[in-house]
C-alpha cells in the first residue's frame, strides 16, 4: 500500500517520524507466497520536491528498504524511477515553487541516474547481488515526458464535480497528482514491462 507523503526513510514530508518507506517495510509481514507476489517500489519525490534533500540519500534509503524486502521474501520486484516533477502544476509560473524548477529538475535527473546505477551499473548492483530476484525496471521519466507531449492538457487541475472529465484534457486532479486515466495508462505500460 502507499502512504501519501511518505519519504524514503522512516518519515513523512510533513515531519512525522513514521509512514516512510523503510518504516512501512519494517512493519510488513508477507502473507502470500513469495513466488506469486509482486512488490512495487515507486518513491522518492517527497524527499526532494522542495529541493531540500540529496537524492543520493533517497537511493541509499531505497537500497536499504529493498534489502529488507528481499530478507522478508520478495522475489519479484518492480522499481520505478521518477518523472520530472516540474511537469506538475505545482511548479507552474504563478506558484511559490516555480523558482525551484531548474533545481528540482536537476535533482530528479540525479535521483534517476543514482537509482539506475544502484540497480544495474555498479559492482555491487542489485542485479549482481540478487540473481534470485526478478527485477522489472519502469522508466516513468520517459513515459511521462512522452505522455505530456502527446496531449494538450489544461494548465489547471480538474476541480469540477465527481463526473469523469475528458482524459485528453486534464492530467492533474490537483497541483501534484495525475488523474485516474494517467494511472490506468501507467498500469498498462507496467503490464507490458512485466511481459518482457
Image (cartoon, rainbow, N blue to C red):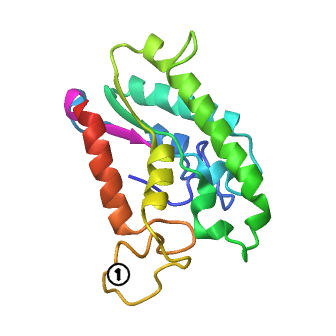
- Residue appearing at x 59%, y 37% in the figure: 112
- Residue appearing at x 31%, y 81% in the figure: 164
In magenta, the rendered stretch is 35-41
Q: Position of residue 47 (x, y in %)?
A: 65, 49
Examine the image and state in which quarter residue 50 appears.
bottom right
Residue at the extreme bottom: 161
Examine the image and state in which quarter residue 92 appears.
bottom right
Q: Position of residue 56 (x, y in %)?
A: 69, 33
Question: Would residue 145 be visible to someone looking at this image?
Answer: yes
Quadrant, the C terminus: top left
Q: Is residue 40 magenta?
A: yes
Label 1 sits on residue: 165
Q: Position of residue 155 (x, y in %)?
A: 56, 76
Along the viewing direction, whichever of 126 and 159 lies nearer the viewer? 159
Q: Is residue 8 left or right of residue 139?
A: right
Q: Is residue 162 left or right of residue 51?
A: left
Question: Would residue 12 be visible to someone looking at this image?
Answer: no
Q: Secondary structure at mark 1?
A: loop
- In the image, is residue 26 above or below residue 188? above
Q: Position of residue 190 (x, y in %)?
A: 32, 44
Along the viewing direction, whichever of 167 and 82 lies nearer the viewer? 167
Q: Is residue 113 left or right of residue 177?
A: right
- Residue appearing at x 43%, y 75% in the figure: 170
Along the viewing direction, whichever of 63 and 192 lies nearer the viewer? 192
Q: Is residue 77 left or right of residue 149?
A: left
Badge 1: residue crowd in 10 Å (few <14, some 14–19, many ≥20): some
- Residue appearing at x 40%, y 25% in the figure: 70
Amino acid at each position: 500500500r502507499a502512504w501519501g507523503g511518505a519519504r524514503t526513510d522512516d518519515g513523512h514530508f510533513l515531519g512525522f517520524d513514521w509512514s516512510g518507506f523503510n518504516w512501512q517495510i519494517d512493519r510488513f509481514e508477507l502473507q502470500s507466497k513469495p513466488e506469486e507476489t509482486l512488490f512495487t517500489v515507486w518513491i522518492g519525490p517527497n524527499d526532494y520536491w522542495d529541493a531540500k534533500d540529496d537524492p543520493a540519500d533517497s537511493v541509499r534509503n531505497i537500497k536499504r528498504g529493498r534489502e529488507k524486502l528481499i530478507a522478508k521474501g520478495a522475489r519479484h520486484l518492480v522499481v520505478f524511477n521518477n518523472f520530472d516533477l516540474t511537469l506538475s502544476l505545482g511548479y507552474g509560473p504563478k506558484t511559490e515553487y516555480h523558482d525551484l524548477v531548474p533545481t528540482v529538475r536537476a535533482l530528479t535527473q540525479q535521483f534517476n541516474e543514482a537509482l539506475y546505477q544502484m540497480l544495474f551499473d555498479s559492482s555491487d548492483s542489485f542485479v549482481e547481488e540478487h540473481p534470485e530476484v526478478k527485477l522489472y525496471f519502469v522508466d516513468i521519466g520517459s513515459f511521462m515526458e512522452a505522455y505530456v507531449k502527446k496531449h494538450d492538457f489544461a494548465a489547471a487541475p480538474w476541480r469540477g464535480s465527481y463526473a469523469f472529465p475528458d482524459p485528453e484534457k486534464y492530467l492533474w486532479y490537483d497541483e501534484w497528482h495525475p488523474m485516474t486515466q494517467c494511472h490506468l495508462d501507467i498500469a498498462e505500460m507496467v503490464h507490458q514491462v512485466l511481459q518482457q
